[in-house]
Image (cartoon, coloured by chain):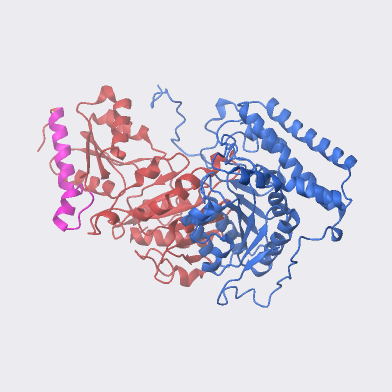
Chain colours: A blue, B red
Amino acid sequence: MADTAKAKGGGTARSTGGRRRTRKDAAPDLTSERPETLLDYYRQMLLIRRFEERTGQAYTQARIGGYCHLNLGEEATVVGLMTALREDDYLFTNYRDHGYAIGKGMSPRTVMAELYGRSDGVSKGWGGSMHMYDTETRMLGGYGIVGGQLPLATGAALAISYRGGDEVVMCQMGDGTTNIGAWHESLNIASLWNLPIVFVVVNNFTGMGTTVEKSSAEPELYKRGSAFRIEGVRVDGRDVLAVRDAAADLVERARSEQRPYLLEATSYRMKGHSVVDPAKYRTEEQAAEARANDPVASFEARLEEAGILDEEKKKEIAEAVRDEVADAADFAENSPHPEVSTLFDYTYATPVANESRRMPADPVFAE
Amino acid sequence: MSVITYRQALRDTLRAEMHRDENVLLLGEEIGVFEGSYKITEGLLKEFGERRVRDTPIAEEGFVGAAIGAAMLGLRPVVELMTINFSLIAIDQIINHAAKIYGMFGGQTSVPMVIRTPGGGGQQLGATHSQNIELFYAFIPGLKVLAPSTPAEAASMLRAAIRDDDPVLFLENLGLYNTKGEVPDDESVAEIGRAAVTREGTDITLIGYSRMAMVATQVAEKLAAEDISVEVVDLRSLRPLDRETVVASVRKTGAAVVAEDDWLTYGIGAEIAASIQEGAFDYLDAPVRRVAMAEVPMPYAKPLESAALPSVASITTAVKETLSAVGKRVG
């Protein structure tokens, strides 16, 4: 299932003779899994699916402003990755971050309230869709600037290493990010300084509309770590168990070896780049392929075939998820807008003399 | 009290802060083995080791961003950018990340870091290595921008910057590193956001920061011999900007000249002049003058470079012309 690109020339010096695991060639066998665990993955995937559908709806109803990028079609990747992390591990992501926020442990309520720009949002309405952040669950941010999170995540891993901690940083990004300078600088630093970080490229084969082949001279992205002697692995991002196993392996190796790793998860965006993108650049075949590869539907079918999920259980989970999403939307809807009086509360952490608190038409010098 | 260079004041302060707080670490190009392009970090690798004094690859975006990420987890990194010109390569991390993280995430995480970097022309380094672009950072809410002009200020302001929980751009100047001054032995911590009247006077207010604050003092000393009383205001903090101190001085003297090493159009002096007209309109006896660098890419040849930069002579001329406009006797 997973391809690997080994670092050439003894780059993973600290990993040679280490705990390389043998990977199975076929999709992980369901019979070796606990049924409750599988049902929980299914529930989480369905929660993200329904949450994002509700988000898209709220956006078209103008309840949510700004840009809005959904994780539809990436549920298996999100849940597989988040399952591989410990609670005290850190996560940095790009702007397609709602599912990750929920997957890392944030309440759908505070995520939805943030999308609505309300005071009960996780960042009190200061961040919005692209900037989910929660100190508590160590989701250290969705970032709107492509590649912006890579140096930050590398620095978080530096802080862990500096203190001799055993947490790991996971840094998620899209396929287009592998072409930006911050990618090269961050992977180089992470490898030079032996930092415990797993870079995860979610490859949905399209930037906004530009294909990977048109933007990356090496389109097999997991191989691009080799320039930095970082071992890379490619996994089918539509298979939650394959993603979990590959990610868990790399996360634990990063932890025990204090080395960076690279994981590429191939995935399909079900919709356009953002809610307002009709994805006209996609052919009908590509759209049909994305639908046929729906990770939620295919996992559901696998669970049904294995006799783990029946109609009754399916209905029970669907209803619970529906209620949770409705509750999140209600919570957001009823949360107050932030008070304008709080406008100057978050410019500086350390209060400072002569900080400007001038409203647009105020004179510079108040009498 | 001891008399030391600006360079020594910075080095002593870095060393003391590293001894005081285990979370303080240094990152930058050539700061360790090479001991710094301008030798600010001389001896520190030997004293503290590679864990706390890290030579970085030539990757400003990468290592400035890494310092931000480390600060998010509670370390207090002090980054050296070899010159402010190279900050342009890290500008996305500084402006879109360091300056935004506290506010954008609703105050959940602060970014306690310092970026030390020298600006300044006059060293025949040509167009790309002689710029004064601190304005780019002084423009950005969420950043604090300090510009000390003396060894004593360098020490007390660096101490303040390292202990502050926000990202601080700490502007040094190539022309100041060898200047000497008295530095108190106490561990005084400057207050960020405050300008200072560094010399009292009655005829005119002369405003500067960094190297220009030093030159302004030289101008004031020279004009004192001609019986012209110049009050000098050192801005010290470019963000937040202490307009009150500037305006209080101009209300007293009735005239003002701003000296700046950056370009005039849209420069720091433009902001100061606008603040003076709003805060001291009724007190002004002449238009506010600005003395700034000529609006060209800095040339290499010495006569051209010298002509492009503000100097004691050009500032003196502007002060005298302003006083003539006021109708005061000039020598």
Residue under the point 48% across and 70% down: B47
Which secondary structure is most common in the magenta stretch?
A: helix
Q: Quadrant of residue B228?
A: top left
In the image, residue B216 lies at what x, y percent? Answer: 24, 45
The picture quadrant where one finds residue A53 is top right
Residue located at (69% from left, 26% from top): A333
Left or right of residue B145: residue A230: right
Looking at the image, residue B82 sits to the left or right of residue A224; the answer is: left
Quadrant of the image containing the N terminus of chain A: bottom right
Q: Please tell me which residue lies in front, A199 or A121.
A: A199
Q: Position of residue A49 (x, y in %)?
A: 72, 40
Counting from the top left corner in percent of width and height, residue B331 is at 9, 38
Q: What stretch of residues is rendered in magenta?
A: B297-326
| Residue pictured at 73% horizontal, 56% vertical | A86
Q: Where residue A339 sits: x, y (%)?
A: 59, 26
Q: How many marks?
A: 0
Query: Given the current orientation, which residue lies at the most extreme left position?
Result: B331
